[in-house]
Image (tube, rainbow, N blue to C red):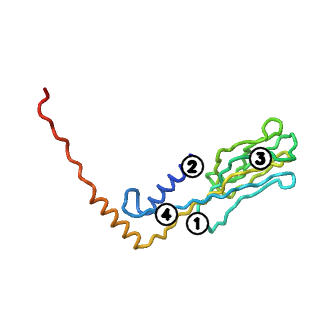
Amino acid sequence: MAAGTAAALAFLSQESRTRAGGVGGLRVPAPVTMDSFFFGCELSGHTRSFTFKVEEEDDAEHVLALTMLCLTEGAKDECNVVEVVARNHDHQEIAVPVANLKLSCQPMLSLDDFQLQPPVTFRLKSGSGPVRITGRHQIVTMSNDVSEEESEEEEEDSDEEEAELCPILPAKKQGGRP
């Protein structure tokens, strides 16, 4: 599991416990499911931009984790600049160049799970490509569908676990040492 994914799961685990009644509480955390799907698109002289977006009615968290950009068959030895258009923390649209690929010196670039929140637009700012962009579309959902029976059973189980724990006894003092 990648470090970014592990950190995301740790955060989501913390978040689900918080939503379910606080960290350290006896309430059951909301179940978290994470689905991951392959993502890919190609930019070229014919298709200079591609927008990745999700349905707004969806309550899930969506993350687009980019892994690689590479020139594909038919690319010329010219600079191919790829930029990403997304929103910053103030929800303002910004455009940032993420790669400058050239067949003779840098035909590919690893982005190591560079994570973006949709909607995201990829543009071939200069060059004729074709440039292939690959990654993963991660969908994280938190379900609040915990039935009362399951909740009561788990509370009883936690009470039983607490009863099984032995109390901590103070250490015994030894008599004088020789």
Q: Secondary structure at mark 4?
A: loop
Which amino acid type is shown beneath numbered disc 3? Val
> Counting residues from the N terminus, which is met first, the one under dot 3 or under dot 4?
4
Q: Marks 3 and 4: which is nearer the front?
A: 4
For disc 2, the marked residue is 1
Which residue carries the number 4 mark? Answer: 31
Kind of element beneath mark 1:
loop
Q: Of callouts 4 and 1, which one flags the residue occurring earlier in the amino acid sequence?
A: 4
Residue type, mark 1 in image: Asp
Residue at the disc numbered 1: 59
Q: At 63% from the left edge and 56% from the top edge, which residue is drawn?
A: 63
Q: Secondary structure at mark 3?
A: strand
Whether pointer 3 and pointer 2 mark residues with C-beta atoms closer than 8 Å, the reply is: no
The residues bearing labels 1 and 3 have C-alpha atoms spaced at a distance of 30 Å
Pointer 3: what residue?
A: 82
Provide residue 109's location: percent of width, then percent of height.
73, 42
The mark closer to the camera, 4 or 1, is: 4
Find numbered disc 2 in the image and state the secondary structure of the residue it sits on: loop
